Image (cartoon, rainbow, N blue to C red):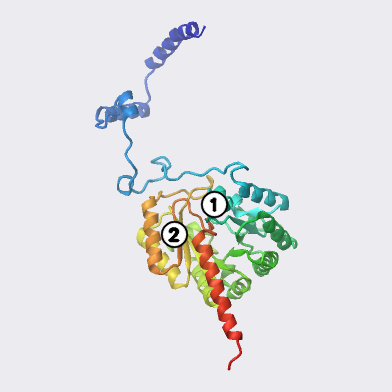
Amino acid sequence: MLRRTIRSLCPAASAGAAATSSQPLSPEKAAFLEQFRAKVANDTEGKDSLDGFVESVETPISAASVGPIQRGSEPLPKWLKLKIPKGISRQPKYNRILSSMKEKKLSTVCQEAKCPNIGECWGGGDGDHEAATATIMLMGAHCTRGCRFCSVLTSRTPPPLDPLEPEKTADAIADMGVDYIVMTMVDRDDLADGGAEHVKRCIEKVKEKNPTMLLEALVGDFKGNTSLVEVVASSPLNVYAHNIECVERITPNVRDRRATYRQSLGVLEHAAKFSQGRMLTKSSIMLGLGEEVAEVRQTLRDLRSAGVSAVTLGQYLQPSRTRLKVSRYAHPDEFAMWEREALDMGFVYCASGPMVRSSYRAGEYYLTNYIKKQQQEQQQKQANKEEPQH
């Protein structure tokens, strides 16, 4: 039956092809066809035939052979592949966090910002030395700023704050069973204090119900108001994070005009000085927005000079068509280079890779143990102060 059908279709297909071929090609199609024929005729890799193309051996990727890939001229690089979250039998922590967030009606930046590492971070605690990490977004899902790289919704008049959010957040985190929590926030320029007191109450409530929980706050710049920086920095935090996002030259084109490069550096420097070593300060840089190598190096130096202890570098990926386009895809070798340079500059921790994000595996084995060691040292200093003098 199948053979008879194919025979009956073949004459019709041949007739259709003949009719089509008799139609003249447009100048654009004719030029493309000539270029394609010339490319096949000049092929030296044995790919000018089907057999040669199938049997050809693919060469491994290297920085020299790839170079900076321009968006639109080449397909997405092979190293930019996502790990799909596994099922409940394979990643119980991932599913437990997801259920808890839905039940409490809380927002996570992992979901709102469409982070590609959600499965890896949320399910991290199922390994031997992997601390599961979740990032909760405080004060709703609407931001008063409109950074051109970010997919979080923008609103000049966001909904009012939920007074029960600190309690609900603490309950949700207790149910998650995570080891390390990142609490980030939308910018709320509509509020007199930018939401600083609300963020502090959330942190205190979480610590009250989960005393051993390691806490990181990824916060805004509070318009550079150092007194508001101190409000959050005085809470029981382990890490104070604020993202510089990109190099100085392109900041006006990438971030909201109310967020400046120097203002962010000032916030980080003040937080580091105010804490007096009680907590780490942390920031993040995106590549692929039009930066130059020398500018990235200078940004790392600026962060280190501001007292920043930990830094992450990752590839910017366009979250939607309305956001900034990717200028280039940096090779993994470049990210490895930045990690080496950052550690040589004196950063105590650096996560650098194409899929790294600011909260990427924040509870990683090294960082977790570094924070715990720092806590012990602070406790020992406090105990020494309280000992009676003889």
Please give the label number shown on residue 306.
none
| Left or right position of 10 against 59 | right
Give coordinates of residue 265: x percent, y percent: 49, 69
Q: Earlier in the sequence, mark 1 or mark 2?
A: 1
Q: Amino acid at mark 1?
A: Gly
Decide: few, some or many residues near mark 1? Use Cα within 10 Å; few <14, some 14-19, many ≥20.
few
From this viewpoint, is residue 298 visible? Answer: no
* Residue wearing tag 1: 127
Secondary structure of the residue carrying numbered label 1 = loop
Q: Please report the residue visible at 70 percent of the width from the left and 64 percent of the height from the top.
A: 209
* Residue wearing tag 2: 250
Image: 341 above or below 332 = below
Q: Quadrant of residue 256?
A: bottom right
Q: Please report the residue visible at 59 percent of the width from the left and 81 percent of the height from the top.
A: 383
Give coordinates of residue 111: x percent, y percent: 60, 50
Secondary structure of the residue carrying numbered label 2 = loop
